[in-house]
Amino acid sequence: MRGCCLLILLLIVVLGSAAFFADRVLADPSLGAAPAGPAHGESEAAIAVTLGAQLVAELVVQPHGVVTLSERDLTVLAQAHNPHPHSLRNLIARVRDGLLVVEADHPFGPFSVKPVAHILLTLDSAATDPVVSTQLVELDVGALTLPGFLRDRMVGALAPSFTMNLLFSGSAALQLLRANLECVVVAADGVRVGVHRPATPPDPAVCGS
């Protein structure tokens, strides 16, 4: 009798845990409002041309220039570099708590789950041409944050990738200015990108926080 009760208790715990995890995985992540801000183009190339022209205009009158990629722009870029277009759909990018957050829909049997990648952006100025580096710091599925070992195993299958480096090849102006990148900051209004004139020392503070 005691063994039977323990077995029933164990079964209840297992079923309860499974129900809890299923509920969390299938839940919608609480990411707030839809992507906001001005749209600088409907494609990566169009965004590059618009922002390149803005930076050139700023550098004509001052030694530093800053442009902001809005959440709507970031969504266009995320969709342009979707690593798994057949399984990751409806990519949406936002900025939250100093990180770039990319959400997608992913089929999971008869259901659909929403992987959410929390990405840290940093500017690596050690190379000849500065590079915007990305680091996945958190991967959620629905409302469940995956532990590190699961995140590392599933990152290739679930986490949307993101790159800003190809943006600087999208227009002649950005190609010329890439070597003068001085800051990249994830702010409340989007991702701010700063450049300086060739003869001006870089000042990372121009992007603010």
Image: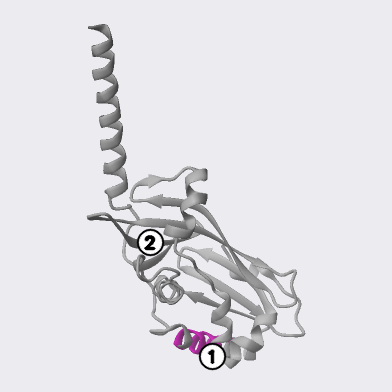
Which-is-in-front pick, marks 1 and 2? 2
Residue at screen point 44% across, 73% down = 70
Query: Which residue is labeled 1 in the image?
Result: 53
Query: Which residue is labeled 2 in the image?
Result: 103
Q: Is residue 53 magenta?
A: yes
SS for dot 2: strand
Q: Residue furthest top?
A: 1
Q: Would you identify the image quadrant in which residue 78 lies?
A: bottom left
Estimate the spatial distance between the alpha carbons at disc 1 and disc 2, rounded to whole Å.
Answer: 30 Å
Q: Residues within 10 Å of mark 2 (few under 14, many from 20)?
A: many
Numbered range of the magenta stretch: 46-55
SS for dot 1: helix
Q: Is residue 28 above or below residue 72?
A: above
Q: Is residue 57 left or right of residue 91?
A: right
Q: Which mark is residue 172?
A: none
Q: Main secondary structure of the magenta part?
A: helix
Image coordinates of residue 107 in percent, x first then y, are: 30, 59
Image coordinates of residue 173 in percent, x first then y, are: 60, 90
Q: Is residue 3 left or right of residue 77?
A: left
Residue at screen point 65% across, 72% down = 131
Q: Is residue 64 magenta?
A: no
Which circle's residue, 1 or 2, is located before the other in the chain?
1
Q: Amino acid at mark 2?
A: Glu
